[in-house]
Amino acid sequence: MKNLSSSTLGLLLLAAVLLCLPLVLPNTFYYDVAIRIAINAVVAIGLNLLIGYTGQISLGHAGFFGLGAYASAILTSRYGWPSALALLAAAGATAVLAVLVARPVLRLKGHYLAMATLGLGIIIMIVLTNEAAFTGGPDGMPVPALVLFGWEVSGEKSWYAVCAAVLLLMAWAAVNLINAPGGRALQAIHGSEIAAFAVGVDVTAMKIRVFVLSAVVASVMGSLSAHYVGFITPGIAGFQHSIELVTMVVLGGMASVFGSIVGAVLLTLLPQFLSTLEGWETVAFGLVLMASMIFLPKGVVPTLRARLRRGNA
């Protein structure tokens, strides 16, 4: 075990947890929570590649999540496309949009970049709300079941298996990307764009690629979420959802793949635990986040890892 890297150990632990979790989930409610955690975790990992590793803030990623959800819903329900093909088409359309907006948007820095991505998310939500002939408007629209290779995914156990597999695959891919030369280039950009350019990194191209990658990940999970829930409204593309995704990244740990998963777990479970406070859940939620940022300023996983290293030193 000593020869295994921390990333490999993390992946093995994640696989073990995902395999054993069905043995202790007592009913469909807990399966539903686990599925939502997995969906959020995959999006958070993709967003962490952009924010945590590359240093490019995005406050509009829920817009890409909503695009994937609505594109799959419209293509399957109104045009009769197979759901798998619709999911791929939604991801492709999202990638094209991300490429078109990435070059001008990623020229900006700091709060200017944050405002630009926020505006993009708001525009997407407005379009989804106003194009009622296709999207159902504010009332939303139903989404058919997901069919993969002739198998209709139905029931919480089947959906858990799909989402758990996607989460494990995404975590593995992200870990390998970060440890590859491309991942080190992303981290160099975060450290200093000028220094990264000086050593031969194509800064603009790398920023565009990671932006498109994170957008496509959000789109794919939006499509899966839409098929799982069976009904969508424009709220899934709203500002509040974008903030929740960013908070998962920050709370779990910037530049930490497994921190993204922990952040998704905490931000998905907290509302469930606080629901008994009847009207004070939002206040309690805010206090919990404030305490986390005060006592765990770098996020849960990086802070705990640093403390364990100091304890072993």
Image (cartoon, grey):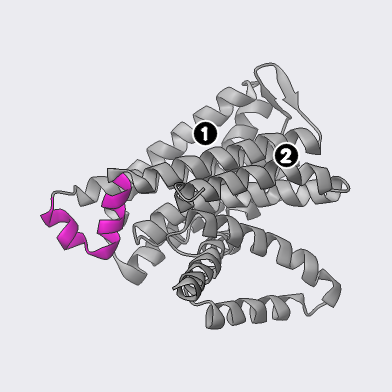
Given the image, on which type of amino acid does mark 2 rest? Tyr
What residue is drawn where x is 19% and y is 47%?
Answer: 202
Q: Position of residue 209 (x, y in %)?
A: 33, 43
Q: Does the CB distance between marks 2 and 1 fall below 8 Å?
A: no
> Which of the pair 153/86 is nearer the observer?
153
Spatial CA distance of label 2 from label 1 is: 22 Å
87 to 181, vertically: above or below: above
Q: Which of marks 2 and 1 is nearer the N terminus?
A: 1
Q: Image check: 93 left or right of 65? A: left
Residue at the disc numbered 2: 160
Tell me if residue 189 is in the magenta stretch: yes
> Which of the pair 178/4 is nearer the observer?
4
Residue 85, by quadrant, is: top right
Tell me if residue 190 is in the magenta stretch: yes
The overriding secondary structure of the stretch rendered in magenta is helix
> Which of the pair 153/53 is nearer the observer?
53
Given the image, on which type of amino acid does mark 1 rest? Ala
Q: How crowded is mark 1: few (under 14 residues within 10 Å), some or many (20 or more)?
A: many
What residue is drawn where x is 66% and y is 44%?
Answer: 16
Q: Image check: 18 left or right of 48? A: right
Q: Where is residue 129 in the image (x, y as percent from the top left)?
A: 61, 50
Residue 103 in view (yes/no): no
Q: Position of residue 131 (x, y in %)?
A: 59, 43
Count of marks placed on residues: 2
Instruction: Report the quarter where the C terminus lies.
Output: bottom left
Mark 2 residue element: helix
> Which of the pair 238/39 is nearer the observer?
39
Q: Image check: 243 left or right of 95? A: right
Residue range in magenta is 182-199
Residue at the disc numbered 1: 90
Query: Farthest residue in the top direction?
Result: 150
Mark 1 residue element: helix
